[in-house]
């Protein structure tokens, strides 16, 4: 599965809070930095493990913490799906 | 108290509309309202709203397509990185114009329909618009734009949940809003004709909840219950002048679409003062912002930060006092008003609609 943000969801930087937000009809989701790193990779070209790989490389996550990162990614992608923010 | 950050601007561009729905949220004294803001004024206001923190704008009305400058306003919203939503009846619209709006940066379209059954739909709207609306919804999804199908629910269409969900699936909606009528504005004038029975409502709620579970992750199905049948009031607008800026066509700044019905308040206009100034210090927006205004039982209620005391417009319309506890709340001293209205609607009634004027 290569998660992709739904058409109705727009990821954008919020200059007022300094954070990224996912905006969708009548709602918004404020993201912390790690959630934003995941959301911006949900573009339909990467699998969940590729997303984990990329973030681990970029942030220099040690191998010992890899499984906790993977769990974060899986959970956040599931949250997006549950909110209908991923393409079905 | 410092002003909270608004996230959403609801821009009612015009009160003009070819439809005449008997639950229209526009004021009942349409003829008394001033002229509309011009293009440049709206462009300025969009910028001022973004500066205050707004991230999403709903272009609505009336029928916003009646404004020839809609494309320019959508483009301005995109320039400001605002998420833009067109809330429309789909009348009048051509596919060409929809393409232009999409190219201008429109993010989302919400089309309202009155019923899944064409004859019924047109009888409710007071206008033959149903086939056009279905066509518009298909254009929206064909163009790859996300679509919300919205239906206002009441006595004459609550039995249609299955058909409405099937229609939403058929036209490719990503969101389905099944919103029970709120009894302010025109809907209050038509309350006896619109209020459902509790049995109708329970069946509809159950059907909606089944579809919601079935469609999770595919179509977001929302069922908005009518506060007349609940025990607690609705969290109206997430609190008065808290998250939403609502602007009416003549440039006045409100906490919600119905607030001009509270005749004891005077709302300031962006024609006279900057939006930020109005948002932070206009008397009307300060009147019921926060909790200081609350009477008992709201003041000491454990739900006061959940439902914010309910709807001020409803309190004013039913009791004559905008600071009264919303009568929809079972703890309200005047809750009997709502119970009596439900009883009256169930009795023998003339259920002909008083259609919205133009």
Image (tube, grey):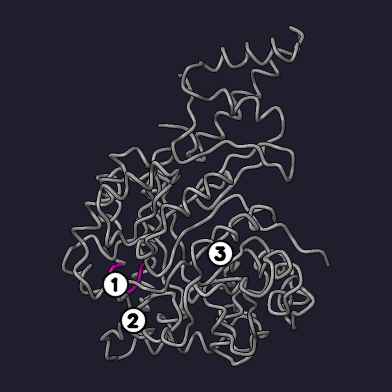
Residue B51 visible, this angle: yes
Residue with the most extreme left position: B119
Q: Which residues are magenta?
A: B152-157
User: What residue appears at the point 54 percent right and 87 percent down from the top-left corner?
Assistant: B317
Q: Chain of mark 2?
A: B
Q: Chain of mark 3?
A: B
Q: Are marks 2 and 1 in contact (CB under 8 Å)?
A: yes
Residue B342 visible, this angle: no
Q: Split into 4 quadrants, where in the image is the N terminus of chain B? A: bottom right
Q: Is residue A5 magenta?
A: no
User: What residue appears at the point 48 percent right and 27 percent down from the top-left corner?
Assistant: A4
Distance from label 3 to label 2 (Cα)? 28 Å
Q: Split into 4 quadrants, where in the image is the C terminus of chain B? A: bottom left
- Marks 1 and 3 belong to one chain: yes
Q: Residue B237, image x and y in percent?
A: 59, 66
Q: Are marks 1 and 3 in contact (CB under 8 Å)?
A: no
Q: Which mark is residue B41?
A: 3
Q: Main secondary structure of the magenta part?
A: loop
Where disc 2 sits, the SS reads loop
Q: Quadrant of residue B254?
A: bottom right
The residue that label 2 is drawn on is B356
């Amino acid at each position: 599965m290569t998660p992709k943000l739904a058409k109705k969801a727009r990821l954008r930087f919020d200059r007022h809070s300094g954070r990224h937000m996912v905006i969708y009809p009548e709602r918004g989701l404020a993201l912390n930095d790690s959630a934003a790193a995941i959301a911006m990779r949900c573009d339909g070209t990467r699998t969940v493990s590729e997303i984990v790989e990329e973030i681990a490389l970029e942030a220099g996550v040690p191998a010992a913490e890899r499984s906790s990162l993977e769990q974060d990614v899986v959970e956040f992608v599931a949250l997006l799906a549950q909110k209908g923010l991923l393409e079905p | 108290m410092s002003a909270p950050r608004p996230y959403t601007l609801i821009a009612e561009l015009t009160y003009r509309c070819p439809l005449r729905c008997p639950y229209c949220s526009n004021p009942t004294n349409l003829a008394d309202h001033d002229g509309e803001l011009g293009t440049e004024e709206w462009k300025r206001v969009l910028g001022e709203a973004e500066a205050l923190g707004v991230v999403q704008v709903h272009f609505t009305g009336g029928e916003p397509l009646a404004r020839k400058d809609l494309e320019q306003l959508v483009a301005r919203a995109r320039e400001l990185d605002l998420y833009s939503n067109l809330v429309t009846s789909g009348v009048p619209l051509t596919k060409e114009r929809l393409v232009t709006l999409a190219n201008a940066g429109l993010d989302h379209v919400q089309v309202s329909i009155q019923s899944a059954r064409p004859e019924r739909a047109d009888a409710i709207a007071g206008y033959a618009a149903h086939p056009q609306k279905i066509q518009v919804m298909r254009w929206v999804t064909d163009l790859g734009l996300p679509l919300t199908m919205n239906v206002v629910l009441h006595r004459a269409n609550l039995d249609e949940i299955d058909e409405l969900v099937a229609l939403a699936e058929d036209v490719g909606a990503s969101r389905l809003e099944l919103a029970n009528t709120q009894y302010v504005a025109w809907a209050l004038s038509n309350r006896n004709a619109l209020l459902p029975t509790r049995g109708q409502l329970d069946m509809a709620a159950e059907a909606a909840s089944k579809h919601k579970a079935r469609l999770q992750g595919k179509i977001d199905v929302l069922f908005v219950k009518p506060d007349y049948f609940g025990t607690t009031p609705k969290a109206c607008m997430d609190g008065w002048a808290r998250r939403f800026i609502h602007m009416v066509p003549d440039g006045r700044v409100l906490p919600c679409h119905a607030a001009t019905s509270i005749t004891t308040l005077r709302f300031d206009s962006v024609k006279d003062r900057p939006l930020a100034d109005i948002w932070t210090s206009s008397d009307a927006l300060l009147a019921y912002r926060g909790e200081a205004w609350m009477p008992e039982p709201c003041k000491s209620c454990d739900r006061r930060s959940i439902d914010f005391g309910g709807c001020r417009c409803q309190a004013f319309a039913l009791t004559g006092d905008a600071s009264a506890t919303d009568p929809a709340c079972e703890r309200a001293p005047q809750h009997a008003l709502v119970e009596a209205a439900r009883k009256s609607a169930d009795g023998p009634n003339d259920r002909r609609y008083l259609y919205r004027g133009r």
